[in-house]
C-alpha cells in the first residue's frame, strides 16, 4: 500500500487481497480532517479482478470505513456503470476533495465520489466507441483534468476523440470530454500512455510503447505536456528501460523517480528491475536491484 503524501486531498493506494472481496454491505463515508492536513486520508482498493471494494483510512493507517464502496453496493445503487473488478484510484489529489475512480478495461468509466457521503456525483464514459482502457487521472484546474488511455482504436473516425492511446482532456465539473492530446509514436509500437503526474505547470505522461499484441516493448519515455495549452514541452527517453510506471516527485520536488518492471515475455520471464532518479531532463542515474521470489 502507498499513500501519496504530496496530496492535500485524499490520496490513493492499491491492495490485492485474495478473492471474493465484495462485502454484503457498506460502511459509507467519513468526515475529512481539516483542509490543512496533508495527506487527509488514504484510499485502499481490494480487487480480485472480478469485484472491487474500497476502504478509507487515516494517514496513520487507522481504518475509518472498511467498505466505503464496492462492486455490490454500486450495482444496487442505480449507477449506470457499477464498479468493476479492474479499478484504480486517482494517483493524485483533486481540487474538490472528491475521490476519483478509474474503471479500466471493459468498463471505461471515470466516477467522481464524495468521501463524506459515499455518493457518486457523476460518471463519465470515456470509451468513445472502443476499449480505451483508461489508466489514471489527474486534475490540473477546476475545469481541466487528464486521463491517459492505453487502448488504441483500430477503426477511428466514427466519433469525437476516438483514436485512443492518447491523453484525454476532461472538464470534471460537468463532467465531459473536451479534447485529446496525441502522444508520440515509435514505428511499430503504440504509445500506450500508462500514468500521468502533475509537476509544476506540466503533466508528465509515461509512455510504455508496446506492440498491439504485446509481443514486444520499446524503451519507455516521459512526455511533458504543458497544462496551459496541451502542447508537448519535451520528451525524455528512458534508455534501456521498459514497462515504466508513474513519475513520483520527491517531497522536496528536487528529484523525480520512476520504477520500471521491464518487459514480461509470453513465458513470464522478467529481466532485471530498475529504479531511476531524474535530476534534470537530460541527466539520469540508474539504481538497479534484484527481485527474489520466495
Image: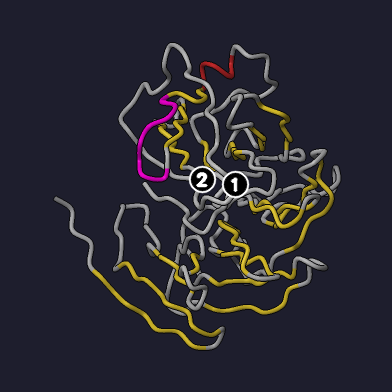
Q: How is the image coloured?
A: secondary structure
Q: Nearer the viewer, residue 107 or 131?
A: 107
Residue 286 located left or right of residue 221? left
Q: Residue furthest left?
A: 294
- The alpha-carbon separation of the residues under discs 2 and 1 comes to 7 Å
* Residue 63 included in the magenta stretch of the image: yes
The x, y position of residue 142, in whole percent, is: 78, 50
* Viewer-side label of 2, 1: 1
Q: Which picture quadrant has residue 205? A: bottom right
Q: Which residue is mark 2?
A: 40
Q: Which residue is mark 1?
A: 35
Of labels 2 and 1, earlier in sequence is 1
Say above or below: 171 vs 186: above
Q: Secondary structure at mark 1?
A: loop
Give the number of marks: 2
Q: Nearer the viewer, residue 13 or 258?
A: 13
Q: Which residue is depicted at the point 49% across and 88% down? A: 283
Q: Which residues are magenta?
A: 59-66
Number of other residues with Cα within 10 Å of mark 2, as a class: few under 14, some 14 to 19, many 20 or more? many
Q: Secondary structure at mark 2?
A: loop
Circles 2 and 1: CB distance less than 8 Å?
A: yes
Q: Nearer the viewer, residue 54 or 215?
A: 54
Q: Which residue is depicted at the point 45% across and 68% down? A: 258
Amino acid at each position: 500500500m502507498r499513500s501519496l503524501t504530496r496530496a492535500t486531498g485524499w490520496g490513493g493506494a492499491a491492495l490485492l487481497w485474495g478473492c471474493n472481496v465484495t462485502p454484503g454491505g457498506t460502511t459509507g463515508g467519513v468526515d475529512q480532517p481539516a483542509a490543512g492536513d496533508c495527506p487527509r486520508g488514504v484510499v485502499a482498493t481490494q480487487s480480485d479482478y472480478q469485484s472491487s471494494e474500497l476502504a478509507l483510512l487515516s494517514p496513520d493507517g487507522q481504518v475509518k470505513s472498511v467498505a466505503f464502496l464496492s462492486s455490490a453496493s454500486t450495482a444496487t445503487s442505480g449507477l449506470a456503470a457499477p464498479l468493476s473488478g479492474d479499478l484504480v484510484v486517482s494517483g493524485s489529489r483533486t481540487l474538490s476533495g472528491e475521490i476519483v475512480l478509474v474503471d479500466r478495461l471493459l468498463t471505461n468509466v471515470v466516477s467522481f465520489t464524495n468521501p463524506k457521503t459515499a455518493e457518486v456525483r457523476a460518471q463519465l464514459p470515456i470509451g468513445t466507441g472502443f476499449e480505451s482502457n483508461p489508466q489514471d487521472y489527474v486534475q490540473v484546474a477546476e475545469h481541466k483534468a487528464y486521463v491517459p488511455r492505453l487502448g488504441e482504436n483500430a477503426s477511428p473516425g466514427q466519433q469525437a476523440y476516438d483514436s485512443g492511446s492518447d491523453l484525454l482532456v476532461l472538464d470534471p465539473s460537468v463532467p465531459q470530454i473536451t479534447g485529446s492530446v496525441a502522444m508520440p509514436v515509435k514505428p511499430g509500437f503504440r504509445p500506450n500512455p500508462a500514468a500521468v503526474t502533475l509537476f509544476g505547470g506540466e503533466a508528465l505522461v509515461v509512455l510504455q510503447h508496446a506492440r498491439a499484441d504485446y509481443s514486444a516493448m520499446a524503451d519507455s519515455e516521459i512526455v511533458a505536456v504543458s497544462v496551459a495549452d496541451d502542447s508537448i514541452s519535451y520528451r525524455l527517453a528512458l534508455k534501456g528501460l521498459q514497462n515504466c510506471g508513474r513519475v513520483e516527485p520527491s517531497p522536496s520536488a528536487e528529484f523525480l523517480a520512476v520504477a520500471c518492471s521491464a518487459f514480461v515475455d509470453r513465458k513470464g520471464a522478467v529481466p532485471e528491475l530498475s529504479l531511476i532518479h531524474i535530476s534534470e531532463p537530460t541527466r539520469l542515474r540508474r539504481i538497479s536491484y534484484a527481485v527474489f521470489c520466495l
